[in-house]
C-alpha cells in the first residue's frame, strides 16, 4: 500500500492546555467528529474508542494510545470498520497531534498516515480540518464565556 499523509492545521486563540482538554474530552461535542464520544483513560498503550453516528450509521472506531505528552503531543492509532477494510495493523492510521504555543494561542498540527492514495489523503485532510474547526469553536466558546 502506498503511504500518503493527510495534514491539517489550525490556529486556536487559547492555551495548549485548553485545546488539549477539548481534544481529549470524553464529553461529546456536535462540532467535533460528528459528536463522537471518546472512551479511553489516555494511558500509554490504552485502547481508545470513538463512538458516534455518521450519515445515519452508528460507528465505533478504535485504536491505541501510543504517546502522550500533555498538553503538547498526542499520538494514537485509528481504525474505522466503516472503511470496509480488514481490521489488521496494516490498515490502521497513526494520528499525530502537535500543539504548539504561539503568540496569542496555539497552533495545532494533525497528521494521519497510511492513506492509500493522494485523493484519500486529501479527503482525510478535509475531514481533519473540519474537526479542528470544531475544536476551535468549542475551545473559543468556552474561553470567552462570561464569568458566572
Image: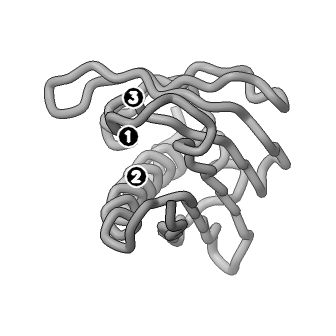
Horizontal side, residue 98 vs residue 119: left or right: right
Q: Residues within 10 Å of mark 3 (few under 14, many from 20)?
A: few
Circles 1 and 2: CB distance less than 8 Å?
A: yes
Number of other residues with Cα within 10 Å of mark 1, as a class: few under 14, some 14 to 19, many 20 or more: many
Q: 53 and 116: which one is in front?
A: 116
Residue to which mark 3 is pinned: 81
Residue at 61% over, 52% down: 95
Image position, residue 122 (x, y; %): 35, 70
Secondary structure state at the residue bearing disc 2: helix
Badge number at residue 66? none
Q: How crowded is mark 2: few (under 14 residues within 10 Å), some or many (20 or more)?
A: some
Classify residue 57 as left or right of residue 77. left
Q: Distance between the residues labelled 3 and 2?
A: 19 Å
Q: Are marks 3 and 2 in contact (CB under 8 Å)?
A: no
- Between discs 1 and 2, the one toward the N terminus: 1
Q: Which residue is drawn at 78% across and 50% down?
A: 71
**Relative to 140, does residue 100 appear above or below in the rendering?**
below
Q: Comparing marks 3 and 2, which lies closer to the viewer?
A: 3
SS state under label 1: helix
Q: In which quarter of the image is residue 98?
A: bottom right
Residue depicted at 63% across the width and 50% down the height: 94
Foreground mark, 1 or 3, reads 3
Residue 114 at what x, y percent from top left?
54, 58
Reading the image, the residue beneath label 2 is: 131
What residue sits 14% from the left and 25% below the top?
56
Q: Earlier along the polypeptide chain: callout 1 or callout 3?
A: 1
Residue topped by disc 1? 33
Q: Is residue 85 rendered to the left or right of residue 38? A: left
Q: Classify residue 32 as left or right of residue 17.
A: left
Amino acid at each position: 500500500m502506498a503511504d500518503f499523509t493527510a495534514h491539517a492545521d489550525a490556529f486556536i486563540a487559547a492555551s495548549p492546555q485548553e485545546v488539549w482538554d477539548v481534544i481529549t474530552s470524553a464529553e461529546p461535542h456536535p462540532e467535533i467528529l460528528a459528536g463522537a464520544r471518546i472512551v479511553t483513560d489516555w494511558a500509554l498503550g490504552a485502547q481508545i474508542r470513538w463512538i458516534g453516528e455518521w450519515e445515519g450509521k452508528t460507528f465505533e472506531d478504535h485504536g491505541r494510545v501510543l504517546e502522550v505528552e500533555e498538553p503538547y503531543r498526542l499520538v494514537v492509532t485509528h481504525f474505522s470498520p466503516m472503511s470496509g477494510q480488514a481490521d489488521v495493523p496494516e490498515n490502521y492510521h497513526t494520528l499525530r497531534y502537535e500543539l504548539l504555543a504561539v503568540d496569542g494561542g496555539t497552533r495545532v498540527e494533525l497528521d494521519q498516515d497510511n492513506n492509500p492514495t493522494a485523493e484519500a489523503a486529501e479527503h482525510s485532510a478535509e475531514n481533519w480540518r473540519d474537526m479542528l474547526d470544531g475544536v476551535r469553536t468549542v475551545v473559543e466558546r468556552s474561553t470567552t464565556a462570561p464569568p458566572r
